[in-house]
Amino acid sequence: MSSRVDLLSDEEIVFSTTKHWLSPLRASVIPIAMLFVAWVLGAILPESDGGIGGWFISLFELVRTGLVVGGIGAIIYHVIVWRTAVFAITSLRVVRDEGLAARRTSATMLSAVTDVQTRVPFMGGRLGYGDVLVIGKGGVAAAERFLTISNPNQFRDRLMGAMSHAAPSEQPAGAAPATADPLAVLARLAELRDTGAVTSDEFEAKKAEILARV
């Protein structure tokens, strides 16, 4: 499952899951409707007898063929997406990689996650699927939504645990804060920037802040 997750140096996967087997069915409502319409057309269309009526029948046959090809193609696509999607929690980030033609990837630093919510329907509680919302500073409206994944509650619990481990520990009263090597911090930030985990603007702002303390 983790083969599509590109790890940073000193990063390891804490937990990973995939889309649930019901995911392609949930995503294929429209393709299934297309196949149903094609079946209805095949059942009601008479044989072509030429003339204008035959031309219309031939046109509907083309539409029926398009519905069948499009519906089957869409279902196959959703099955492939189901088999290749991965949702992972690492020691540094929460990562999503899914899709083929319309590939959706995201990597959010654990320190940027403010809350995690699950939405599990009645059947999801019995079959082990649901949606997970990874909420950052932008709130629920800008949350990352992982739809129809397996073990959503376990994913939420492991993510919250990883967030607590990633949070900086409190310094004892009167103790001097530990000072990290500025060069090591800059190298780490550059690595995160190169992988897309942080933007260039965020990198430059943090770089200026670190250099100002040197």
Image (cartoon, rainbow, N blue to C red):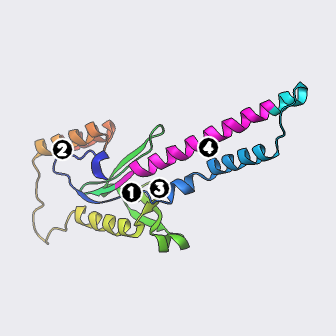
- Residue 64, image x and y in percent? 72, 38
Kindly identify which residue carries mark 2.
188
Q: How far apart are marks 3 and 2 (CA)?
A: 28 Å
Q: In which quarter of the image is residue 99?
A: top left
Foreground: disc 1 or disc 4: 4
Look at the magenta stretch and give its main secondary structure.
helix
- Residue 115, image x and y in percent? 40, 64
Task: Provide the secondary structure element on which disc 1 rests.
Answer: loop
Kindly identify which residue carries mark 3.
145
Find out whether the residues at labels 3 and 2 contact each other: C-beta distance under 8 Å. Answer: no
- Residue 73 covered by magenta stretch: yes
Task: Provide the secondary structure element on which disc 3 rests.
Answer: strand
Kindly identify which residue carries mark 4.
71
Kindly identify which residue carries mark 1.
18
Q: Is 183 above or below relative to 148?
A: above
Q: Give the range drawn in magenta.
A: 58-87
Q: Distance between the residues labelled 3 and 1?
A: 14 Å
Instruction: Left or right? Give the position of 90 relative to 30.
Output: left
